[in-house]
């Protein structure tokens, strides 16, 4: 009786361990959008309402993900690294203190609840064309 209970516990333990490995493996591969030195990869990405998009800085320079206030569908929630209230606040914080920057290996995620096109950019590399778009379908 006791031996059987012990074996059952060991069996359960290895299942948990395997589950842990799987979780770690998927964590390292689970971004949707990467970032090179001056681009979002890919720069256009389509999801469905309620989906969460994960960005990861896969490059070596600091970047931001900053929504354009004027580039969102009606009623959409503003999104940005640093979780600012709006684009002006995000820009000011970045120019003042580099707030909102994400560095190599850092991630940012946002859940899109409003259908339509969401335009965003990286504050330091906007002029270099680091601009992206999330298309949210119903
Ligand atoms: Cu950038």
Image (tube, rainbow, N blue to C red):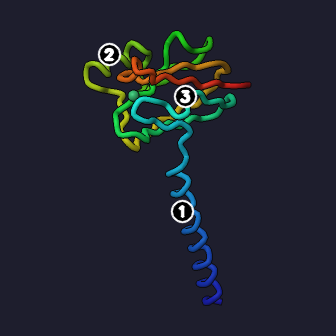
Does dot 3 land on a helix, a strand or a loop?
A: loop
> Which tag is nearer the camera, tag 3 or tag 2?
3
Residue 11 x %, y %: 62, 77
Mark before the other along the chain sequence, 3 or 2: 3
User: Which quadrant is home to the N terminus?
Assistant: bottom right
Q: Nearer the viewer, residue 71 or 17?
A: 71
| Residue closer to the observer: 8 or 45 | 45
Q: Nearer the viewer, mark 3 or mark 1?
A: 3
To which residue does mark 2 refer? Answer: 92
Residue at figure coordinates x 43%, y 15% from the top left: 87
Residue 61 in picture, x, y percent from top left: 34, 35
* Marks 2 and 1 close (CB-CB < 8 Å): no
Residue 81 in sight here: no
Q: Is residue 121 visible?
A: yes
Q: Residues within 10 Å of mark 2 (few under 14, many from 20)?
A: few
Query: Where is 19 relative to 70, above or below?
Result: below
Judging by the rendered image, the residue that carries numbered circle 1 is 20
The quadrant of the rendering that contains the C terminus is top right
* Quadrant in which residue 94 is drawn: top left
Could you tell whether 35 is left or right of 118 in the image?
left
Q: Which mark is residue 43?
A: 3
Q: Residue pushed farthest left?
A: 96
Q: How far, Cα to Cα, is label 2 from label 1?
A: 41 Å
Residue at the (52%, 34%) spot, across then down: 41
List x then y, in percent, for residue 127.
39, 17
Q: Is residue 110 above or below residue 20?
A: above
Task: Give the quarter the ligand 1 occupies.
Answer: top left
């Amino acid at each position: 009786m006791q031996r059987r209970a012990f074996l059952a516990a060991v069996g359960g333990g290895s299942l948990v361990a395997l589950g842990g490995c799987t979780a770690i493996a998927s964590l390292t591969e689970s971004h949707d959008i990467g970032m090179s030195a001056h681009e979002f990869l890919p720069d256009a990405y389509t999801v469905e309402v309620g989906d969460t998009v994960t960005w990861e800085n896969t490059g070596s320079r600091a970047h931001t993900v900053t929504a354009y206030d004027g580039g969102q569908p009606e009623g959409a929630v503003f999104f940005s690294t640093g979780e600012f209230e709006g684009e002006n606040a995000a820009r000011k914080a970045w120019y003042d203190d580099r707030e909102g920057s994400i560095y190599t290996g850092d991630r940012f995620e946002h859940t899109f609840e409003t259908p339509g096109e969401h335009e965003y950019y990286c504050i330091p590399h906007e002029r270099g064309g680091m601009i992206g778009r999330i298309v949210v379908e119903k």
